[in-house]
Amino acid sequence: MRTIMMCGLVLAAMMSGCATVGKVGANTTNYRTWWRDCGVSRDVPSNIEVFHGQTPSPNSAIATADQLPSPKSNVKGVLRVILPHSECNGQGVEVADLIPDPATDIAPAATAPKMYRFKVAPVEPSRWGE
């Protein structure tokens, strides 16, 4: 009788251990498709936010204070953002540093908010995790 009870306890302990394993495999929650190759998804750190301003050219960006990312998107003293691209069926992204260009800030009109201008410095995927 003791043997049967011991086997039951061992079996119950083994089953409870299997039930708590959780998800298996790589966490791909933050993976994005780099716009230059469209084939390989890369991990973008969760602190980097999407830029909601305008990019009138590949080398410049403008935004109001409301469109700027939060301070948590700051990497080494520079704003690092995700720039959406239309390539890769609209799924392509570019990670870039926004370098302030205060000399060219746009003065607000009477009712318009102040616009901030930035130089866009693309970041290679190998440096996204800095």
Image (cartoon, rainbow, N blue to C red):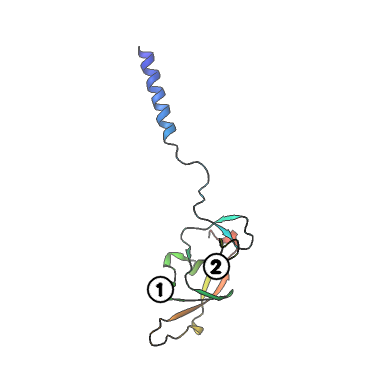
List the residue tagged with mark 2: 96
Tag 2, which secondary structure? strand
Residue at screen point 42% across, 36% down:
20
Tag on residue 15?
none
Percent from the top left, x then y, of residue 10?
40, 23
Percent from the top left, x then y, of residue 47?
46, 60
Relative to 129, 19 lies left or right: left
Dot 1 amino acid type? Asp
List the residue tagged with mark 1: 66
Residue at the right extreme of this rendering: 37
Vertical placement of residue 2 versus 50, above or below: above
- Distance from label 2 to label 1 (Cα)? 19 Å
Percent from the top left, x then y, of residue 105?
48, 83
Label 1 packing within 10 angstroms: few (<14), some (14-19), many (20+) = few
Q: Quadrant of residue 122?
A: bottom right
Vertical placement of residue 13 versus 74, above or below: above
Give the mark nearest the N terminus, 2 or 1.
1
Percent from the top left, x then y, of residue 128?
55, 60
* Quarter of the picture holding the N terminus: top left
Dot 2 amino acid type? Ala
Vertical placement of residue 52 versus 4, above or below: below
